[in-house]
Image (tube, grey):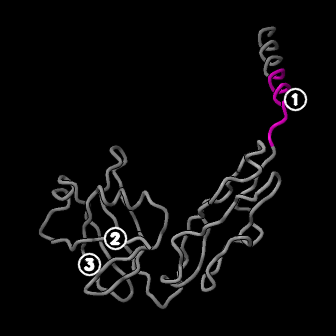
Amino acid sequence: MNKIKIQNRHLENKNHELRDVGIVPGILYGPTIKNTAIQLSSKELRKITGKPGEVYEVSQKNRTVFVKFGEIQTDPVSNDFIHFSLVQMPKGIENEVDVPVRFKGTPVGVKKGGTLLVMKDEIKVNGKPRAIPENVEVNITNLDIGDKITIDDLKIPKKVNAIDDDSEIVAICQPPMLKEAVVDAEELDRGSSEFQQVI
């Protein structure tokens, strides 16, 4: 599980002064902890948000707290971070989060000329923070042309439940486009151009 090394923020420090030196002000809150002013470097925040996953660990008063981002505010022009919030996810309570799907291997259907079409690169699950996986890995090596992978085919931990419908397609290997279809499309475009010239 990804960890975030946050620092407590002194309220006498102005937010705009922190941002001027590459520090993003934030707040940590939740049902069993006190609201705490925190901060994180802009570089670190961008690195964290660029990784897949939604559940994180932070150390707070000699204990581990599970959190997720509540809100991340950015400047509409520069896209620089302005403020962020972390929301506590109590250990004994189930939470609904999105978990990335990690595809492993190259489908045999792709080697035959097919195309892998990913319909969902993350799935919504429900479970306690410690049980929620960082990602759900699926081996697609044996996926042939016309084959598909559904939610039901994914190996999800026993203590975690998928909220999405079991029959929902995650990925499918499409057959290659026929050469005749490509030629017909080119002729159609050519005919359309000639028609426009006549008009």
Instruction: Name the element at disc 3.
Output: strand
Q: Is residue 28 magenta?
A: no
**Viewer-nearest of labels 1 and 3?**
1
Q: Does the magenta stretch mainly form a helix, a strand or a loop?
A: helix
Which stretch did the figure color magenta?
176-188
Q: CA distance from mark 1 to mark 3?
A: 64 Å
Q: Residues within 10 Å of mark 1 (few under 14, many from 20)?
A: few
In the rendered image, residue 15, in percent from the top left (x then y), is placed at 20, 61
Residue located at (75% from left, 55% from top): 172
Q: Where 5 falls versus 105 (above or below)?
A: below
Name the residue beneath numbered marker 2: 4
For the C terminus, the quadrant is top right
Name the residue beneath numbered marker 3: 36
In the rendered image, residue 27, in percent from the top left (x then y), is placed at 30, 72
In the rendered image, residue 4, in percent from the top left (x then y), is placed at 34, 70
Instruction: Name the element at disc 2.
Output: loop
Name the residue beneath numbered marker 1: 180
On screen, residue 165 versus residue 13, left or right, reads: right
Residue located at (25% from left, 86% from top): 61
Q: CA distance from mark 2 to mark 1?
A: 54 Å
